Amino acid sequence: MNYIVKDENAIYYECSYSSDNALFLKLGSEAFFITDSRYEIEAKESVNGATVIIDRDLYGQANKLIKSSNIKKLKYDPKEWTIWAFEKLKEDALKIKFKAVPDFSHKKRIVKSSEELLLLKKAVTLGAKAFDEFAEIIKKHGFDQDERMLTFMAKAMLSQKGKYELSFEPIVAVNANAAKPHALPTDTILSKKDLLLVDAGLKYKRYCSDRTRTISARKDFEFGYEQRFKKKKIQKAYDLVLKAHDNAIAKARSGMKAKEIDALTRDIIEKGGMGKYYVHSTGHGVGLDIHEMPYISSKSDTIVEDGMVYTIEPGIYVPNEFGIRIEDMVAMQSGRAVVL
């Protein structure tokens, strides 16, 4: 197979190293990692299974290699490329067919190896430990702090003072702000018995974790599944979300279509009368990227197989009132969903 890869995580998957200015080129049995001199030492130490080429003109070098190979077709992911970069690659009138394959690398990575599953399990375990530490910090110092300070605290716990990268910017939302699935921090103050939603994750050896908990911020709270809220409407919504979450994990099977797994959460929330407040899909794959295939949505015909890793994260979001989401990462193993 002949293909060219530009995305950092896609390159890392191919040769165990990447930089922010690199290309990976596969031409039959030969593979090339092309980068500039800033990364020469690390690349030569770390790249596996590819010849390292140092050149300031990445696209020109790739062009020369393609021309000399006499190939007729080259696959690429159009989502990775700007128009400028793609035109630079083709600048010397390459006489080959470029075959656009959207999500080329994600499709290769959709089923995780046993080694990848161990890395993802470790990332999830570290992330869960950080949630526990964050809970203790909130109980000691978090009440009467605003969402911005709470987000800062969450980052400190997740990164372990810089030891780990974050999977994404954490979401720390109180009460009505939690009704925005991708809420940004505000000056809203956390008080006891408020609703608090935390969505966060960290990376272990580049592999991501992703977890969400919604809690009643009592003085002795934990980021567990069992929560008690003072408002009946919130409690009803929380119980529905938890039931939907548990149902999907218990009943998901390898061989199902992704949209069938989505229905395992959506049907429960709709039957509970709150379907209009469930505004996103059930989940998404997680790996080197925080959002990968498979996408667990009502429109996806993807067949879910053993080795796939994805989130189960149903939610209910009532504008100007509250939002609830409960999220865990699962791996399909021996035909069933196993919480990592």
Image (spheres, rainbow, N blue to C red):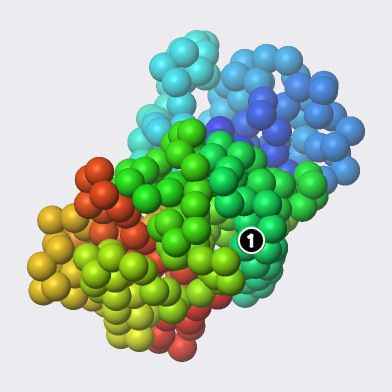
Note whether residue 191 is visible.
yes
The quadrant where residue 325 appears: bottom left
Is residue 175 found left or right of 18 in the rendered image? left
Where is residue 64 drawn, in percent x and y? 62, 21
Give the labeled residue for mark 1.
139
| Residue 175 at x, y percent in the picture | 37, 50
- Residue 1 at x, y percent in the picture: 50, 48
Q: Quadrant of the C terminus?
A: bottom right
Q: Which residue is painted at 49% across and 52% down in the image?
A: 191
Question: Which corner quadrant of the image does residue 278 belong to?
Answer: bottom left
Quick one: SS at disc 1? Answer: helix
The relative height of residue 307 versus residue 149 in the rendered view (above or below) is below
Whether residue 134 is visible to the viewer of this picture, yes or no, is no
**Residue farthest along the bottom direction in this orientation:** 334
Residue type, label 1: Lys
Viewer-proximal residue, 264 or 278? 278
Residue at (19% x, 55% y) in the render: 277
Q: Nearer the viewer, residue 49 or 257?
A: 257
Q: Picture coordinates of residue 271 (x, y %)?
A: 11, 74
Front residue of 335/234: it is 234
Picture residue at 29% right of the left edge, 70% below the top: 235
Above or below, comparing residue 145 to residue 213 in the picture = above
Question: Who's the residue at 77% across and 52% down the image?
Answer: 160
Total count of labels: 1
Are there few (<14), some (14-19), or many (20+) residues within 10 Å of tag 1?
Answer: some
